[in-house]
Amino acid sequence: MESVTTTPTDVDVVLPCLNEAEALPWVLARIPAGWRAVVVDNGSTDGSAEVARALGATVVHEPRRGFGAACHAGLTAATADLVCFCDCDASLDPSLLVPFVREVHEGGADLVLGRRRPRGRGAWPVHARAGNLALARMLRRRTGLRLHDLGPLRAARREPLLALGLTDRRSGYPLQMVVRAADAGWRIAEHDVPYLPRTGASKVTGTWRGTCQAVRDMRRVLAEAPGSDARAERRAVR
């Protein structure tokens, strides 16, 4: 008899948000049934928080600006066993997280990342792609991981994520998560996902200057020495 694979419903999706009122309806409509959307408002002035709340999302306010600050506020506000992260600009479809969550739930991986594959003109500017490639190479030298992307679409268990003790509150947060997970012996998987032209202007990699700042933030993360508590983190993820 063929086994039936079910998708867990105890899942929170963290959505860092800064002036994404236009994109929110599209994004929230694609949150899988039974999952909770946690929109972290990072100082929006366009009514994003009100839009998100009206559409049924849980809204968390994080006044300290920074992508990492918003992501970590969402992680600490999450209560589900499994936590996902997704950008809130309609460049990524959160329904793509279903197989990521299933893989973590079934023990196939501890952290699953989406490798962005651009669809359409302007989906991924050349300068942003170049910065991402450089970081992937630096990550490989630092950890041995042969990843191609450090994209924001990802899934893992909440308690092990908190045990990593992430400290970056800027652009380096997604990279620090991967570096510390690798140091702790996590099994990290990567799968292709379509990357669409975003709604509105990018707050991080929309310009060469923003990309360079993000790369500087991430270089600081890569310079960190492996933590002495890696064994405890490895035990926590099992």
Image (tube, rainbow, N blue to C red):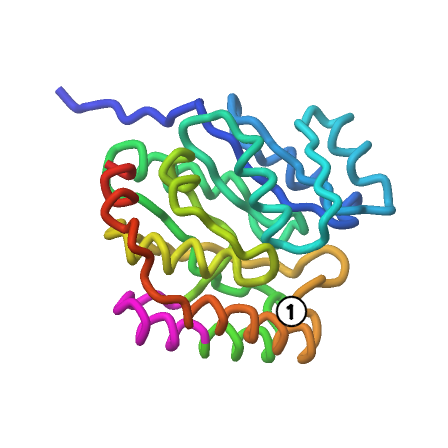
- Identify the residue shown where x is 38% and y is 68%: 148
Is 209 placed above or below 169 here? below
- Identify the residue shown where x is 65% and y is 61%: 197
Q: Does the magenta stretch include residue 109?
A: no
Q: In which quarter of the image is the N terminus?
A: top left
How many numbered marks appear? 1
Q: In which quarter of the image is the C terminus?
A: top left
The picture quadrant where one finds residue 205 is bottom right
Task: Find the residue positioned furthest to the left.
Answer: 1
Residue 228 seen by the camera: yes
- Identify the residue shown where x is 46% and y is 66%: 221
- Identify the residue shown where x is 35% and y is 66%: 225
Q: Give the range drawn in magenta.
A: 135-148
- Relative placement, left or right, of 59 versus 109 is right
The picture quadrant where one finds residue 198 is bottom right
Q: Does the magenta stretch include residue 146?
A: yes
The picture quadrant where one finds residue 210 is bottom right
Q: Mark 1 falls on what kind of element? A: loop
* Amino acid found under the numbered disc labelled 1: Thr
- Relative placement, left or right, of 195 versus 140 is right
Residue 187 seen by the camera: no
Relative image position of residue 236 (x, y in whole percent): 28, 37
Q: Nearer the viewer, residue 232 or 71?
A: 232
Relative image position of residue 168 (x, y in whole percent): 54, 57
Relative image position of residue 30 (x, y in whole percent): 59, 36
Is 40 placed above or below 6 here? below
Find disc 1 in the rendering and name its residue: 205
Relative image position of residue 233 (x, y in whole percent): 30, 44
Majority SS type along the magenta span: helix
